[in-house]
Image (cartoon, rainbow, N blue to C red):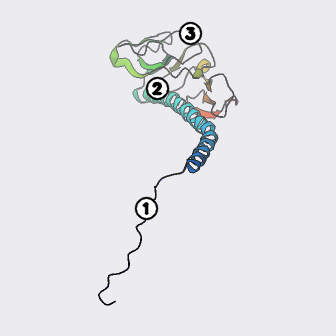
Amino acid sequence: MNGEPYPCRPARTPRASGFTLIELMVTIAIAAILATLAAPSFSDFVIRNRSAALTNEFVGSTLRARTEAVSRNVCMTMCRSTNTSDALPSCAGQGTSWGGGWIVFRNSGCDPTVTAPGSADDLLLVNTPVSTDYSLTSPTDAGLIFFSPTGNPRPSDAGAYLVRYKATTRTSNRSICLTALGRTLTTTYGDTCPQ
């Protein structure tokens, strides 16, 4: 060590950092395989959630109409409508498809043939059209559900309202059973509704 400097080591050349082409190709291949496996599951998840949302909207609307009829001691009409964007929408008339949306209004005269609210104050709820990928159909072509002040629908309005994705048979499809007492029950698509 006699004052001699430390021996010098040769300088290292910096190594390039990053992925090699092979590592990048393997990563992309694995990601593609995982995406292919996950895509159908994600699609089913979205379909199930949208079917459930449509079912819940319809059940919530019938429950609200029935509750208002009983609590206010008035008649309520829930009907399919194709002009839900209007200031004062009206019923669409007879038909089984509720895909154009629906409205709920106070029916002061308790007349089941009334197809529009008397004023904006009578209008309780407006539900916009559903996605064209889904259908919501009623058991009859009356096009409306009429609730008496006791909360009971007409016997002809009770039955299975069907929620369906496109024209397929899927586990996401549902039946909404409206009983003669005005209660709703969600069951598997095509099940017989309880009396």
Report x, y in % for residue 22: 59, 49
Q: Which kind of residue does numbered mark 3 sit on?
A: Gln
Secondary structure type for disc 1: loop
Tag 3: Cα neighbours inside 10 Å, few (<14), some, or many (≥20)?
few
Q: Which kind of residue does numbered mark 1 sit on?
A: Thr
Residue at 60% in and 48% down: 26
Kindly identify which residue carries mark 1: 13
Tell whether label 2 touches label 3 (CB within 8 Å). Answer: no
Q: Earlier in the sequence, mark 1 or mark 2?
A: 1
- Point out the frontmost of discs 1 and 2: 1
Q: Find the residue positioned furthest to the left.
A: 3
Report x, y in % for residue 44: 61, 35
- Point out the frontmost of discs 1 and 3: 1
Residue at 63% in and 19% down: 139
The answer to whether residue 34 is magenta is no
Mark yes or no: residue 194 visible. Answer: no
The image quadrant that residue 142 belongs to is top right
Kindly identify which residue carries mark 2: 65
Tell whether 73 sits left or right of 145.
Answer: left
Q: CA distance from mark 3 to mark 2?
A: 20 Å
What are the residue bounds of the magenta stretch?
95-99
The image quadrant that residue 152 belongs to is top right
Q: Earlier in the sequence, mark 1 or mark 3?
A: 1
Nearer to us in this view, 182 or 25: 25
